[in-house]
Structures are given as structure tokens and as C-alpha cells.
Image (tube, rainbow, N blue to C red):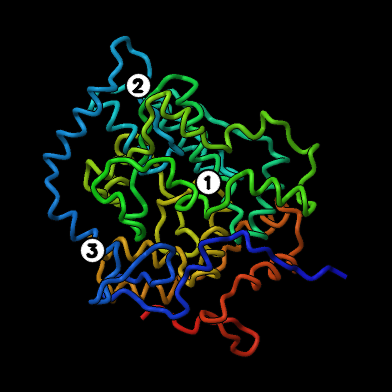
Amino acid sequence: MQKKFKRSNLEKQIKKIPKYVKWCKNCLISNQRPRIFFDEHGICSACRYNEYKEKINWNKRHDELLKLLDKHRSKNGNWDVIVPSSGGKDSGYVAHQLKYVYGMNPLTVTWSPLKYTEIGRENLNSKIDKGFTNLLCTPNGNFQRKLAKLCFEQLGDAFHVFVLGQINYPFQLACRLGIKLVFYGENGELEYGGDIKHLDKPFKPVEEWLSQHFKGVSLETLLTYGLKNNYLSKKDFSQSDLIFYKSPSINELKKNKIKGKYFFSYFKKWIPQENYYYCAEHTGLKANPERTEGTYSKYSSLDDRFDGFHYFLRYIKFGLGRCVEDASHEIRDKHITREEGLILAKNYEGEFPKKYFKEFLDYLNISENRFWQVVDSWRAKHLWKKKGAKWVLKFPPK
């Protein structure tokens, strides 16, 4: 008989979520998204930021970009900027722009997904073939699987271990290689709804990463919990296995004159759909032949077979899945109407990612029964109710 699942309180952000549900009157995002806020007119911060973008002097921002790049531009042909890149539409756009439009020498770096899709690896190779040197880091597989299981069960997100490496690996390399500039795509806190503290800043300092990217849970916290609760043993890893999961210290970043994560979206108006068209033309990016489970699009987050479970668990925890996020951005960009977004959400929001389900269970070494025990443990009482044998949202998008 399988032991009943009991989860911890490691997940910090879920405690701060309002116990009532409010939907944005312009897009389809609710107040359940961590750090989002709504104004007195019922409009979310992501929509207000999208309006704010119309007032930005983009020519002035472009001049700022040129000054920043000139400050860091290599005089001897060495790499002068790191671009974390999966080969997808957003990082591909940034890397290609920096090299072929602005004459920089970017080193693209990739933290391996938990398990590559064929099209994800094909798109990465295609980008490399367009003229980029790329470093791919594939971490200790046994250790990463055990961390992913811990994160799935105790944070409601196996993807968390990937995020640790995705954010920290580029900065560890930057310190070691003497590269002072690291460029990401969009500032998600602004584009999707969250903390607007850095509204008019081109970068996010390292002090903000723990709360905004890592759910308040560092690698050290995971190791302590995992060792104490039999998710890990000291034989599973060496100190060298930990390096790229950790952020460089603030002192180390300051010593290397690295300010933080720079965002291309600060300097260029960010439109994800346009990034796809750009990369289809310039980096050989291919979309999936079929739509992605849980949404209607075919060109976002294509590289990880288990990506769908990140969005599915987010739907369970916050009542916000992948379709609502995709549709909301397209509503803000005026590619679709809110009414069209609601129809898409009705058809695809919360769809279970069944294609790689068996592989996901095998990867985490858990049973299907254990999977659903974990999932159901993350259903907030103010969001979910049982209707017969089926769980349904109390307050679906409206």
C-alpha cells in the first residue's frame, strides 16, 4: 500500500495569493498570478504596462542600447555578450539581432531541458548553423532527476530545477569568462504581470532573483530538505555538480562588473508572435506540426518534453494555464479579441499533457497514483470543487 502523500511548506509564493478570484477586464489573467496587481478599474498590471509601452520613446531606448553595446563591444573579436538561448523564438531573436544587426560577438549558452524534444534539438542546431558558437550544459542526470522529483512534489513544479540552471549557468560562465553583459529576452514581470519595481530599468539585479524566479527556494534549501527527507543522499552529487545551479555571490558579480539580467524588451517593443516570424526567416526556427497541449499555439516552449507539466501544475495551483497566458498576450497585442480568447480558453485551458505522461512518470520514478496524489494536494480550496468524480474550477475565466 502506497504511503499517503504529505507536502511541505517550501513553496513561499502560494501563501501570498488572494483567496478570492478577480479576472482582468481587458485580458484573461486573474489576480491569482504571483505578484500581479489590479487597478481600481479592474485592469491587470500586464495590460497597464502594455499601454505604457505606447508612451515609451523607443528611439531614446534604442540610443541607450547603442551606448550599452558600445561600452561592452570587444575590440579584439572576443565574445562580448552572453545570450542564454534554447534556440527558440525569443532568445534566437535576441542573439541574431545582437550579432547581425548590432555587430556584437554573442556567445549563446544553453541549459539542457529535462528531456529534449526532437524539434527542440533541431531548432537549437539550426540556430548554431546560422553562425553562433553555443555552449550546451547537460547536468548530472541522476542528480537532476532526483531534484526534479523533489521540486514536483514539494513545490508543485518539476521545472523549478531547470529554472535554477537556466538563470544561474549563464552568470557563472560570465564570471569565469570575463563577459560583463548577459542579455535575456523579455522581462516577464512586466510583460506577463508582476512586480513593476524595475519598470524603467534595463536589468534586474541578482537580489530579485530568489523571490521572482526561484519561488523563494534556493538550491541550498532544496539540498537541505532533500537530504533530510530522503529525496537525496550525499552520494548523489559532488560539489562540482552544484556550481551551475547556484547564483554567483553578489560580491563576485560586482567584482566582475556584472549588474544583472539585461532585457532586450526594455530596448525593443516586445511582440512574441513577431519574434517567431523573425526567427523562422533568420535562424531556421520550425514550429510544431501540431498545436502544443494546453494551448492553441505551435511555436512556444518547444524544447522540453515535460514542459506541459509545468503549465498543468500552474493551472492546478493558480487556476491559470498555458492557453490563458498565450491568449492574454495576444489580446494585449491586439492580435485577437477578448471574446476570441475566451473561446480558445474554453477549448484548451487546463488540457492534460498526455503525450509524454508515461515518460514523465518514468523520469521521476513515481506511479500514476502518486502523480495524482501530488496534483490534488496543490488544489486550493478557494479555486477548486468536486463535481461528481471530476474537479472543476469554481471561477473559470469570464
Considering only vertical position in the picture, is 304 above or below 248?
below
Question: What is the secondary structure assignment of the residue under circle 2?
Answer: loop
Residue that carries the numbered disc 2 in the rendered image: 80
Quadrant of the frame with the N terminus: bottom right
Neighbour class for label 3 at 10 Å: few (<14), some, many (≥20)?
A: some
User: What residue do we see at 67% from left, 43% from top?
Assistant: 144
User: Where residue 15 appears, x then y in whole percent?
Assistant: 53, 68
Residue that carries the numbered disc 3 in the rendered image: 48
* Total numbered labels: 3
Question: What is the secondary structure assignment of the residue under circle 3?
Answer: helix
The disc, 1 or 3, on the residue closer to the chain's N-terminal end is 3
User: Where residue 304 appears, x then y in whole percent?
Assistant: 55, 47
| 176 relative to 184 in the view: left or right | right
* Number of the label disc, if any, that sits on residue 163: 1
Q: Amino acid at mark 3?
A: Arg
| 81 relative to 227 in the view: left or right | left
User: Where residue 365 appears, x then y in whole percent?
Assistant: 76, 54
User: Where residue 39 appears, x then y in whole percent?
Assistant: 26, 72
The reply to whether the C-beta atoms of the residues labelled 3 and 2 are less than 8 Å apart is: no
Q: CA distance from mark 1 to mark 3?
A: 27 Å
Q: CA distance from mark 3 to mark 2?
A: 35 Å
Considering only vertical position in the picture, is 221 above or below 330?
above
